[in-house]
Structure formats: C-alpha cells, structure tokens
Image: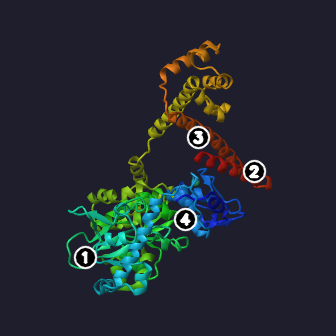
C-alpha cells in the first residue's frame, strides 16, 4: 500500500506533537513550549523542546530536531510510511491510498504480520475459554477473569492445524513462515511451536500484538517458557512486556522491573501497574532508554535465585549509563508473583519502601557472606562492591558511597577513591578518528568521480549542472573545474584543451586516468547524492550553531521568532535530505 500525498499533508498538519511525544517522554509546559529530558541523548536537565503550534521539536543538547513524523521514525526505528500511519490512526485521519507516489511506500509485509498476530491472539483467547484445564491453571496462579481479559491471555490447543486455520483466514504460507509462530517439521510442514501452551500475547509500546510467550502448565517435556522467533516486528531487545500499559503511569511513578510475564500480570492486578519485564534476557540499552524517557528510577524485583541476582548485577552498569537510579528489592519468596500471592499488596508496598540502592545492596550481600572484622575479608568485600562504584559517574553520589563504605570497613576513603579511579574504563577515541577519515575520503572520491564522468559524458554533465551550486565541491581544483564544466560543451581531450592552467590540467588528467567509468549511471547518482547530503549537513550544522548562540540570549520576541524560523529551515533541510 502507498499513502497518498493528501493523507501525508493532513498528518503533517495535525497539531498533536505534544500528545504524541508525551507517550514516550515526560513533558512539562514551560512558557509557550513544552520541555523534557531528551530521548536521543543522555542528560540531567531538560533541553528537549517541543512547540505545539509549529509542530516541531528541537534539542538544545544534541541538536536533534524534526516534526512528529520524524520523531516516531527515530524513536521506533520505523519508516516514513509507518510513522504516518501511526499518527493517522491516532488522529482519526483516513488513510487514502495512492498508486503513484513513491514516498508513501508502506512495508506491507509488516502490516500483514501485525494483522496475523492479532488474529492468532483472538483465536487463542477463544480457545482458552474452551479449555477448563488451562483456565484452572491461571486461576490457581491467582489471576482473575478480568486480568486474563486485560492481558489477552489465551491457550494454544493441541491437535489443531494452526497453519491451516490461518490459510482459511487468508494468510499466505510465506507470511506464516515469517510470523515466528511455526517451525518446519520432518514433513516440511509448518508446525505450531506453541501447541498445548498457555499463551501470553506480547504487545509493543503502541499496543500492537507483535509476538507470543507460551508456558507449559501440565507435566510435559520441553522448555517451561518459549517465545516467538524474532522477526521484523518482534525484537526482544526493543520490547518490554507490559510497557504499553505501564507507560500511562510511568511519568508519575518509578518503574518496577521483573523477570516474568506472570510477575507483571499479578503486579498490575494488585495495583502496581508500573511493572514491566524484559523478554527473558538481560536488560538492553533500548529497553533502558524506553524507561528513561518516562521515569528516572527503577526498582528491580528479580527472582531470588542465581539467575535473578546476576541479572541485577548486569543491569546496573547500563542503568547508570543512562543516569537512572536503581533500587533492589529483597524478595523472601522465589518471585514477585509468589510473594504477592502469599503476602499481599501492602507487604509488597513495604518492600518497595525498604528497597536499597544498588551499592548498599551489594555491600549488604557481601557483609552477610564475609565477617567484616577479619582483615583478610576487606579485599573480598571490596571486590564485590567495586564494579558498581566504577561505573558511577555522579561525583556526589560516588563521594557519599566512598565515605560510607570506608567508615564501615575502617579504611582510608582517599585510598578507596584512588582504587576506583585506577580501574575505571576509559573510552577510546580511535574509532571516531577513523570514522571521520573515511567520511572525508568518501567525499573526495565522490567529487572526483562526478568530475571525471561529466568531462567524458554530456548527459551526466547535464545531470550535474541541473542542481550544481558552487559549494557542492569543496576542493579548490574541483570548484574551478565546476566553473569550466558549466561553460563548456566539449568532452575529454577537447575539454582539457580549454583549460589554460597547467596544474589544473594535470590534476584533471590524473583524475580521468584513475577513475573507472560506470555506464549504468547509478554510481553517478549515488555520488551526487553523497555530496548534496554533505552540503545540506554543512548548512544544518551552520544553523545549529546559530541556534546554540540564540539559546544563550535573553528570550525577547525577536529572538523567539528567529529561533522558530531557524528551526523551520532546519526541518525543511532535513526533509530535503530524506528525499
Ligand atoms: Zn538531545
């Protein structure tokens, strides 16, 4: 499906940028604008600014900017057409299709995948109501009928050919193969990997069903939990189970991070609707960023076993890198679901109250293992706490931890601080240097190729001159040749004859010798794009510098207006770049 220009214009005119961005980050009104912590770079004080009337956002920290469409594209790693669709749905704008417009191509396969997941979910839900055993299991875990409906829980009946069912609904074998629901059996037929399991549909942050978790509930062989295979719409690193529900309260309350689907579900049932879970893996930077956009603090309520404890340790570094505070709950029972069932809501609220900052948690754990009065244990205790101290970048917090720990262990705080700093990780700048070098040489190559092709081929020259401006090339020689090309109808040797400067002539000759021609013209278009895009980047940088300057000035009416008009030009340039 292609989206018509008309729909795109309506979406662009829709004044809902604050509402759209608010479902990702917490925004506060300040003056005529809204501000919040930037989701695209790590910051402590808000510099991410949204203008409702201009349908624009701009970050004074990292200079990221755009409209609601580009915001969604960047946040959700989705294409232009999908972002347009998401907004159209939200704004009740009818999506009109168009066969001619290139820009509006939708990844129709993604759409079909979402549709398939939804239909399968509804099918599993019905099947659950017809399976007393599966229902009984869920009730026995403490779930109510309302909760089961709220989370769209289901059951995948055995001895049903799910692929056949889907075929009847009109889903091709090709799309079924990509759905993540099947594996190929010995007969090379699609076999339902979730057969005879309780089904936990997994919804993405926009509330679209994108995959499933399945749990064994009878004595059967196989893994207790399995998930859909990953595909274009189901990426475990990007998804937090329960986030589509939790995001409604996360701007007002810290998040609770747990391990299992049932933990999330029961916490929500008991009123803790800020609970979310990772997909059975260690927390990823994408997941932390998602949480950080809504809240500054996370409470870890992991299982009270080795896997759970190691998940806590692995997560700390990444939460601190995103400057989130992390507290750890100490669960007596195996997991939060069991805890709630045994002790109830108030007891869990008490656990949250008593939660410890990570460093305190590690210290207490070490102190319970090693007798602090024995000298040989000091080193052991320190080694358990050091990893958490090394990643601490907040100097005030670090100072507080160091002074507390040195008092407790009876050691010199300056020596402890020195030990932390010595073992600290330092990022290297080598990668960025290499990157900037290759970037430059790519530009030089593009420039040389364009010139050489335009000298030998008049068609290409026409193509170049159609959009040529003086600052398209950046080397002095190339600029001068650009002028010659604009004024000449000669090719190759005849063209060379027109150049009277000896040095320039030899530069061009060498370049023509070294450059291999491309008959298809594709490389030419590619190089032209590269330079155009660089040219636009230069102008964008220029504007960003001006914006940064303006930001420091007092906000008079004129300054505000200059600011807005620069933001608009920046947005227009970015759109040009995307075409
Ligand atoms: Zn930013």
What residue is pinned by disc 3? 533
Gap between marks 4 and 3, in whole Å? 29 Å
Q: Residue at x 50, y 68 (%)?
A: 206
Q: Is residue 268 left or right of residue 103?
A: left
Mark 1 or mark 3, earlier in chain: 1
Gap between marks 1 and 3, in whole Å? 57 Å
Q: Is residue 158 left or right of residue 21?
A: left
Q: Residue at x 57, y 68 (%)?
A: 89
Residue 356 seen in the figure: no
What residue is pinned by disc 2? 562
Instruction: Specify the quadrant of the image occupied by residue 59.
Output: bottom right
What residue is pinned by disc 4? 24
Mark 4 or mark 3, earlier in chain: 4
Gap between marks 2 and 3, in whole Å? 25 Å
Q: What secondary structure is found at the residue carrying circle 2?
A: helix
**In the image, is residue 141 above or below residue 247?**
below
Q: Residue 159 carries which label?
A: 1
Mark 2 or mark 3, earlier in chain: 3
**In the image, is residue 321 above or below residue 306?**
above
**In the image, is residue 498 above or below residue 95?**
above
Q: What secondary structure is found at the residue carrying circle 3?
A: helix
Mark 2 C-beta to ligand 1 under 8 Å: no
Task: Count residues near mark 1 (Cα–Cα under 10 Å), then give few for <14, some for 14-19, many for 20+.
Answer: few
Task: Count residues near mark 2 (Cα–Cα under 10 Å), then give few for <14, some for 14-19, many for 20+.
Answer: some
Indicate the position of residue 11 as horizontal and vertical percent values.
63, 62
Mark 4 or mark 1, earlier in chain: 4
342 or 98: which is nearer to us? 98
Task: Count residues near mark 4 (Cα–Cα under 10 Å), then give few for <14, some for 14-19, many for 20+.
Answer: many
């Amino acid at each position: 499906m292609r989206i018509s220009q008309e729909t795109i214009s309506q979406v662009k005119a829709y004044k809902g940028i604050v509402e759209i961005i608010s479902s990702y980050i917490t925004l506060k009104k300040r003056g005529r604008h809204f501000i919040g912590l930037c989701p695209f770079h790590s910051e402590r004080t808000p510099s991410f600014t949204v203008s409702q009337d201009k349908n624009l956002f701009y970050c004074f920290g990292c200079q990221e900017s755009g409209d609601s469409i580009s915001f969604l594209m960047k946040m959700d790693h989705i294409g232009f057409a999908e972002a347009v669709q998401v907004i159209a749905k939200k704004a009740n704008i009818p999506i009109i299709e168009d066969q001619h417009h290139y820009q509006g191509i939708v990844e129709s396969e993604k759409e079909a995948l979402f549709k398939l997941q939804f239909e399968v979910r509804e099918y599993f839900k019905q099947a659950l109501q017809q399976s007393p055993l599966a229902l009984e299991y869920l009730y026995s875990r403490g779930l109510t009928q309302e909760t089961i409906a709220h989370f769209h829980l289901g059951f995948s009946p055995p001895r049903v050919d799910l692929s056949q069912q889907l075929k009847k609904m009109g889903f091709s074998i090709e799309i079924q193969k990509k759905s993540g629901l099947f594996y190929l059996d010995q007969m090379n037929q699609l076999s339902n990997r979730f057969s005879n399991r309780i089904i936990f549909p997994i919804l993405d942050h926009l509330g679209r069903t994108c995959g499933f978790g399945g749990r064994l509930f009878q004595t059967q062989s196989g893994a207790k939990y399995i998930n859909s295979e990953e595909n274009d719409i189901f990426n475990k690193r990007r998804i937090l189970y329960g986030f589509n529900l939790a995001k409604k309260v996360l701007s007002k309350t810290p998040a609770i991070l747990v391990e299992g689907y049932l933990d999330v579900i029961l916490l929500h049932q008991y009123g803790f609707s800020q609970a979310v879970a990772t997909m059975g893996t260690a927390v990823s930077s994408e997941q932390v960023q998602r949480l950080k956009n809504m809240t500054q603090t996370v409470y870890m309520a992991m299982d009270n076993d080795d896997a759970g404890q190691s998940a806590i340790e692995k997560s700390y570094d990444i939460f601190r890198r995103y400057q989130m505070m992390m507290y750890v709950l100490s669960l007596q029972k195996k997991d939060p679901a069991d805890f709630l069932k045994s002790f109830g809501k108030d007891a869990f609220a008490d656990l949250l109250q008593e939660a410890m900052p990570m460093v305190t948690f590690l210290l207490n754990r070490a102190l319970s293992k090693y007798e602090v009065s024995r000298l040989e244990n000091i080193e052991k205790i320190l080694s358990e706490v050091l990893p958490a101290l090394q990643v601490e970048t907040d100097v005030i917090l670090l100072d507080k931890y160091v002074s507390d720990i040195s008092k407790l262990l009876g050691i010199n705080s300056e020596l402890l601080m020195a030990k932390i700093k010595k073992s600290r990780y330092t990022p290297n700048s080598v990668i960025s240097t290499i990157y900037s070098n290759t970037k430059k040489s790519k530009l030089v190559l593009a420039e040389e190729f364009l010139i050489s092709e335009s000298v030998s081929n008049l068609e290409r020259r026409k193509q170049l001159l159609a959009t040529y401006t003086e600052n398209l090339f950046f080397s002095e020689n190339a600029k001068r040749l650009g002028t010659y090309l604009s004024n000449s109808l000669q090719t190759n040797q005849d063209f060379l004859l027109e150049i009277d400067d000896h040095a320039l002539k030899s530069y061009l000759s060498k370049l023509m010798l070294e450059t291999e021609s491309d008959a298809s013209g594709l490389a030419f278009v590619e190089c032209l794009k590269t330079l155009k895009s660089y040219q636009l980047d230069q102008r964008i940088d220029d504007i960003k510098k001006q914006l940064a300057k303006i930001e420091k000035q007092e906000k008079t009416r004129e300054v505000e207006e200059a600011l807005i008009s620069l933001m608009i030009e920046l947005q227009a340039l970015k759109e040009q770049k995307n075409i």
